[in-house]
């Protein structure tokens, strides 16, 4: 186990609704990244948070937003849900040391979101 | 949980054989590479990593080979066991910024007794 915990494990929403997913990072890690994994594909980078600020973003629209809290835990918010948002949402934590970014990511088990 | 990688390429091996999973990466500027294992209903689990200043790195039963000339990465698993059955992803990163991993499409490894 990585020590990265996510909640809830499963969620069902309808199109147009909003959702908040939560993640607690591994002890000692100060950086949280969120990934979306569609069925049959590799994870796709959504964004990363470091020192409570967004520190990089993938090709996702603004309705995907996030927060990082002083204890390094994080939330992913998705507004105006679409059917294609159905996926496994993965949180990963890592320890960023200064300018170095090449640290291995430790993933949680994910939240399976189904949009009907 | 739902299965991952329902339509992925599959490598079938006999228990005890060696497995080789291949990956082509896209960015010649990438300088850090990781292999992850993902079992059904779980998140990706770190296996081994390698930096671009190396061409080989060994772990416990696993070896990663990096060929920067042809942008190719491979994962070798010795004495494959049923517990190795999973989907395997390679991922690349480029230093100088945030830790954004680009994942490959994945390969399903099926180990038969």
Image (cartoon, coloured by chain):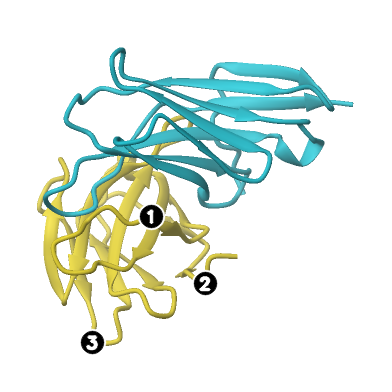
- The C terminus of chain B lies in quadrant: top right
Q: Which mark is residue A104?
A: 1
Chain letter of mark 1 equals A
Mark 3 vs mark 1: which is more N-terminal? 3
Left or right, B85 with respect to A113, comes to right
- Horizontal and vertical percent position of residue A55: 12, 61
The cyan one among the chains is B
Chain whose colour in the figure is yellow: A
Q: Which residue is mark 3?
A: A70
Residue nearest the viewer, comparing B68 with A53: B68
Q: Position of residue B10 (x, y in %)?
A: 62, 18
Q: Residue at x 77, y 27 (%)?
A: B111
Please determine whether, in this image, residue A24 is positioned above or below residue B6.
Answer: below
Relative to A76, residue A14 above or below: above
Q: Earlier in the sequence, mark 1 or mark 2?
A: 2
Q: Looking at the picture, do discs 1 and 2 lie on one chain?
A: yes
Mark 3 chain: A
Which callout, 2 or 3, points at the residue further toward the start of the chain?
2
Query: Label 3 vs label 1: CA separation?
Result: 22 Å
User: How many labels sit on residues?
Assistant: 3
Q: Residues within 10 Å of mark 2 (few under 14, many from 20)?
A: few
Q: Are marks 2 and 3 in contact (CB under 8 Å)?
A: no
Residue A57 location (% of width, % of height): 14, 51
Q: Is residue B26 visible?
A: yes
Q: Residue furthest top?
A: B70
């Amino acid at each position: 186990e990585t020590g990265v915990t996510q909640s809830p494990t499963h969620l069902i929403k309808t199109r147009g609704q909003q959702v908040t997913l939560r993640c607690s990072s591994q002890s000692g890690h100060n950086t949280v990244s969120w990934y979306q994994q569609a069925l049959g594909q590799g994870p796709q980078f959504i964004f990363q948070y470091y020192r409570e600020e967004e520190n990089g973003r993938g090709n996702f629209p603004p309705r995907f937003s996030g927060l990082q809290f002083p204890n390094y835990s994080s939330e992913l918010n998705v507004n105006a849900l679409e059917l294609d948002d159905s996926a496994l949402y993965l949180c990963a934590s890592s320890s960023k040391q200064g300018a170095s970014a090449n640290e291995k990511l430790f993933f949680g088990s994910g939240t399976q979101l189904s949009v009907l | 949980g739902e299965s991952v990688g329902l339509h992925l390429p599959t490598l079938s091996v006999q228990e005890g054989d060696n497995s080789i999973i291949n990956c082509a990466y896209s960015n010649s500027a990438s300088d850090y590479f990781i292999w992850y294992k993902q079992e059904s209903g779980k998140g990706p689990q770190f296996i081994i990593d390698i930096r671009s200043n190396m061409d080989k790195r060994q772990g416990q039963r696993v070896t990663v080979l990096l060929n920067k000339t042809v942008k190719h990465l491979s994962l070798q698993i010795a004495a494959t066991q049923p517990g190795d059955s999973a989907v395997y992803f390679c991922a690349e990163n480029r230093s100088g910024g945030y830790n954004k991993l680009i994942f490959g499409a994945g390969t399903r490894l099926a180990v038969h007794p």
